[in-house]
Amino acid sequence: MPRFLSDGPLQAIAADIEAGRYKAKPSRVFHFEDILEAHRVMQSNEVRCIHCPHLKENPMAKPCEHLQGVTAADFPPPRTPDACEECLKEGTRWVELRECQTCGHVGCCDSSGGKHATKHFHETGHPVMRSVMPGATWSWCYVHEAEGRLA
Ligand SMILES: [Zn+2]
Ligand SMILES: [Zn+2]
Ligand SMILES: [Zn+2]
């Protein structure tokens, strides 16, 4: 999915530019590459410049090869269905659950006290997880900090 300058964290900077308050690099304000660099928007290959109608290639983008072609069928059966593996052992509670594509580990999300899904990535290097909440179809690559959609 292209990421637009009006989206999420870029909304503030887009508003600043429109209001003439953007001061990061005054002489090159309209060079969207500089804006991207300043804000480390590296998740997408394509970025729409708010000052022109063209989609441009983001030169800093590192395409995520981990999420390409990944579908729900590429995930193994969860090791601990409907539960965070570490929270089960520790007796702690979780908010939402994420499943590791590599090994089927189920860990809790970053809004949970344990943050066990993210810890699992740091411990194992397994790059891709998905939400296993009812109805959720998104995945996430920790390496590239990129979001995917599961077909
Ligand atoms: Zn990746
Ligand atoms: Zn947990
Ligand atoms: Zn894993």
Image: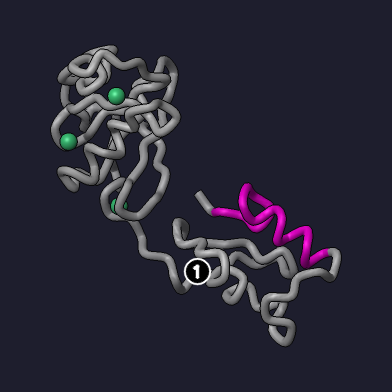
- Quarter holding the C terminus? top left
Q: Is label 1 in a helix, a strand or a loop?
A: loop
Based on the displayed image, in which of its 4 quarters is residue 84 positioned? top left
Residue at disc 1, CB closer than 8 Å to ligand 1: no
Based on the displayed image, in which of its 4 quarters is residue 101 positioned? top left
Span of residues in magenta: 3-18
Can you say whether 64 is above or below 21 in the image? above
Q: Is residue 60 magenta?
A: no
Q: Is residue 14 magenta?
A: yes
Q: Amino acid at mark 1?
A: Asn
Q: Which residue is mark 1?
A: 58
- Left or right of 13, for residue 145: left
Q: Residue at x 42, y 66 (%)?
A: 61
Return the x and y of residue 139 as percentages of the image width and height: 36, 36
- Left or right of 77, for residue 15: right
Number of numbered discs overlaid on the protein picture: 1
